[in-house]
Image (tube, coloured by chain):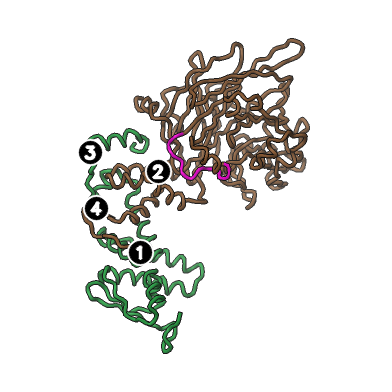
Amino acid sequence: MAKRRRNNKRGFISDDDLLVEILIRLPDCKSEVKCSAVCKRWFSIINSVHFRSKKLQRHHGASSPCTILFRSHGFGHSIYLPFYHYFTEESRILHRIDSSSSSSSYLDFLPWEKVRIHSSFDDLLLLSRRRGQYYFVICNPFTRQWIELPQPHMPLKADMRGAGLVCYPIKSPQQQQQQQQQQQHPLKLNQYSFKVMVVWDRITYTGGMKIEIHLKTYCSETGKWSEDIFSLRDRMLNANTPVACNGLLYWLVGDINIETVDGIFAFNLSKFTNQDPNYIRFINFPSGLLQEKAGSFDIKVRLGLVRGRLRLSQLLITKRNGFVLRVWELNCDNNASYDDDDDDGSSKRWTLVHDVRVKKWIDKRQFVIAFHPENGNVLYLLFNRLHIYQYDIGEEIMEKVGQLPDNVGDEGFCVGDIRTYSLVHPLWPTPIPASQSASASKC
Amino acid sequence: MSSSSTTTTTTRLLMLKASDGVTFEVEEAVATKLGAINNMVEEEGSEDLICLPNVNGKFLGMVLEWCKKHANNNTNSDKGNDEVNKWWDKEFVMDLDQNTLYHLLMAADYLSGTELVDLLTEKVASMIRGKKVEEIRETFKIKSDFLPGQEEEIRKKNSWAFE
């Protein structure tokens, strides 16, 4: 502990340990980056591994800031750009939003007017814009950086169904082993790999209705798209947003004619790019999920991510003016049983985490629209197509936290068309490769 | 640890001597809120005079004032006292000028007053919050020693943080 403390040449706080203690107390990464531009000493401290691990230690267990974006999947202009944003308290601090008035649009820094959100991953969004062909863009809306992907070859006469994004830090095989035990590597450094999957479908009527699914997967490490085609009969990937969890992309599947869902496809994008034919698996719904036609309409079943784990909810209105809400969590830790061929592994695979019967809130049109990405007890419900309520199951508190604008789109929208995208902002924003952020500053 | 037989634990007094010779008579329970003093007391047992050659009397006095408040407020610990402590802490750091803050922080760190260090570092962090780079330099009287172009590069690379 013998240190020279009175060294005025180093400026205020000459002791490095104390300076670290001060800088880890900064509330947001913006202040931190600014501090790194103060002088060489501050720069090297902020960029040191020691600083990062001290900061992680300090924030361990704290709730990350979350932002939920709402988009309509209907027709007209409303399908572009989010029409509503919800920021958690932590996210308001991060974004420096003081009042309840939210900015015009969270994505208004992009040079294109018509951009469509497809999915989110941590603090990243997968977007597309169309100029004859589709162009895909990965964007970090907080840092306002983006990268445009090379263009995929579009299959002819096919419609785009949706797209998903998976992103992870590139690391050595040793670290990879640790990763399986820990959700997040403690020191996210600057190298990331992205994988994107886009799904097109084409319906053919030769001998009954057949759906041809065209999958295109992009991998940032190779910089290339690869593709695969398979067919389904009378069933189709649901138009709801796919959810990425543990490197897999989960997608609801269901009947093509009536909008019901009956299971989940899990796409393993790493296996896909390695041309392993087992990249796709079917996962049964939990046995407690009501699968009558009325029960499994896709607006009643939601997939989402809570603290890096996949959850599934079903909300059913009861005849006595209440609702039943069940939430399951997928057990994806147990890799051994996951890779087994499942006859009926559904009971082992899913854990029922919530089963509540509510009589108090009388409204016949309530839907789960999002999970709180950080708090497993909290879901967001939409009442009467307009009001957003935060429902804390543990505390039994239903609290209004927002209201959708009532003039959305040219034709209005229905609940089934609302898509939500959850952003979880890590301690350090996920970087977008530098070559492309140059294009960001141009505009 | 063996304590001297004549004093009872509640009233034992310690003498703390600062670098400029100023001495303070403090109850043991107050002084041992400082990790460094606590260690000395445990190691040296009956020694009642403790010399602190790295701390000036002015700042030692302030540190001890803080310890006293917290020791008193902690004796009957209920939730109301937490509030009192918080309020008192706020008052304590509110009008500190930078020089005092700096020396106080050094003193608190040297004496291992963990909670006080926490309070003071939090205060310094709040002085950085929301400031531009130039303002931070001005506040803390730091001169940029980057080579030409280096700062621009940091700014360009993280343009999102400098809007």
Magenta stretch encompasses residue A181: yes
Q: Which residues are magenta?
A: A180-191
> Is residue B150 shown left or right of residue B26?
left
Q: Chain of mark 1?
A: B
Q: In which quadrant of the rendered image does the N terminus of chain A lie?
A: bottom left
Q: Which residue is mark 3?
A: B147
Question: Label 2 neighbourhood size at 10 Å, few (<14), some (14-19), many (20+)?
Answer: some
Distance between mark 4 and mark 1 Cα atoms:
27 Å
The structure residue drawn at horizontal position 72% and vertical position 16%, both measured from the top left corner, is A210
The one nearer the camera, B77 or A82, is B77
The picture quadrant where one finds residue B47 is: bottom left
Which amino acid is tagged 2? Answer: Cys
* Residue mark closest to the camera, 4 vs 2: 4
Q: What residue did someone put label 1 on?
A: B91
Amino acid under label 4? Gly
Instruction: In the picture, one chain is green; tell me its letter.
Output: B
Disc 2: which residue: A29
Q: Secondary structure at mark 1?
A: helix
Q: Which chain is brown?
A: A
> How far apart are the alpha carbons under marks 3 and 1?
41 Å
Please, which chain is the residue tagged with disc 4 on? A
Residue A272 spot, x, y in % from top left: 60, 25
Residue lying at 30% horizontally and 34% vertically, measured from the top left: B153
Identify residue type, mark 3: Leu
> Is residue A86 at least partly visible in the picture?
no
Q: Quadrant of residue A199?
A: top right
